[in-house]
Image (cartoon, rainbow, N blue to C red):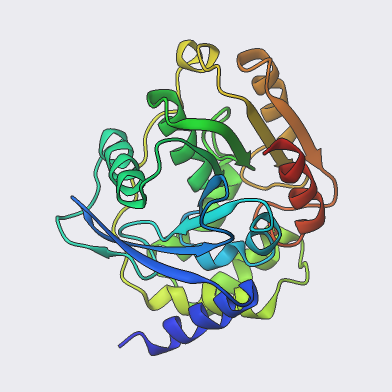
Amino acid sequence: MHEAFFEAYEGLLDLWGDGVEHLDIRTPYGITRVNCAGPQDAPPLLLLPGGGDTSAGWFRNAPTWAHTHRVLAPDLIGDAGRSLPERGRIGSVAELNEWLDMLLDGLGIERTALAGYSYGAWIALHYALSSTRVSRLALLDPTNCFAGYRLQYLLRALPMLLAPTPGRVRAFLRWETGDADLHPKWLRLQEAGTAFPKSRPVTGPRPTPTALRALRTPVLIMLAANSRPHDARRVAEAVKALLPHAETTILSDSSHHGLPHRQANEVNEAMAKFI
C-alpha cells in the first residue's frame, strides 16, 4: 500500500552505508523501529527526527557519528516510518517520556547522549528535563522550546498540513529553504510521506523558565540563521537567559528544513566535539 514511501525510505537509508542494523523494540505504545550504526560497545547516541521526517533523515550525520558512538535512530511512533503504533496514539508529554524510557530499556541502555532536530528537539528537551538518563543533550534548530512559531510560518504550513500533496510539500520547502538545492532522495521521501497515515503529534506549551533554569545536563544548541519557524537570534537570546551554560551556535546560510543534512560538515564537527 505504501510501496513508494518505503522504497524512498530504504533509498535514503542506503546512504548510511554498510553495516546498518534494524531493531524492532516493543513498548507499551507499539513497536519502534530503530536504525543502528557503529560499534555495539561504543557510547550510545540516540537521535530523534523532526516531525514528518524519519530516522533515515540522519543520512549525512549518522555515518560520521558512528565512528565514535553507537548511533540509535528511532522512527517516531505514529509518524512516518517503520514504527507500528498498537495502543492508540501517544497523547501527552508524559507518554512520550514513558515511550523513551521503555525504548531505552528495550535497547539495554541506562544513559545516553541525546540529539533531536526540530520537533524531535522539543521531545528531547522535555525528556531531558524529566529524566536522569540523558548524559548530553544536543538540539538542532529546536522549535517551540525557547520561542514560539512565527505566524507567517504557520500560515504557510497550514495548507500542507491540512491536505498534504507532493506539490504542496515541494512549494513549502522551496519557500522555507530559499529554493535551496535539497538532496533528491530526501525530497522524494518528504513527498512520498504525504500519503503515509500519521497520528496527530503531541503538542503543548514550551518548557517553563523554572524547569529550564534547573537543567544541569550539558547542552549544545545549533540554530539555522535563516530559519523560517522562528528568529534564530531571538532564540539564542532566550537560551542565554534560560540556559546560560549551554553552548549555542548559529549556522550561517542555513534554513530550518535544510538542517541537518545541508550543513552536515558544521553540524557533524560541532557534535563530534560535544559528545
Up the image or down, 178 lies above or below 121; here it is: below
The x, y position of residue 77, in whole percent, is 32, 57
Up the image or down, 19 lies above or below 146; here it is: below
Question: In this image, 189 relative to 79: left or right?
Answer: right
The x, y position of residue 68, in whole percent, is 67, 51
The x, y position of residue 90, in whole percent, is 25, 48
Location of residue 115 by image quarter: top right
Location of residue 250 by image quarter: top right
Question: In this image, 22 relative to 135: left or right?
Answer: left
Residue furthest left in the image:
87
Residue appearing at x 27%, y 33% in the figure: 94
Question: In this image, 193 relative to 156: left or right?
Answer: left
Question: In this image, 136 relative to 184: left or right?
Answer: left
Viewer-nearest residue: 121 or 101 = 101
Up the image or down, 65 lies above or below 14; here it is: above
* Residue 54 seen in this snapshot: no
Viewer-nearest residue: 203 or 33 = 33
> Quarter holding the N terminus?
bottom left
Residue appearing at x 53%, y 76% in the figure: 189
* Residue 159 seen in this snapshot: yes
Residue appearing at x 72%, y 60% in the figure: 177
Viewer-nearest residue: 39 or 149 = 39
> Quarter holding the C terminus?
top right
Residue furthest right in the image:
252
Residue furthest front in the image:
41
The x, y position of residue 7, in whole percent, is 47, 86
How many numbered circles are shown?
0
Residue appearing at x 40%, y 43% in the figure: 109
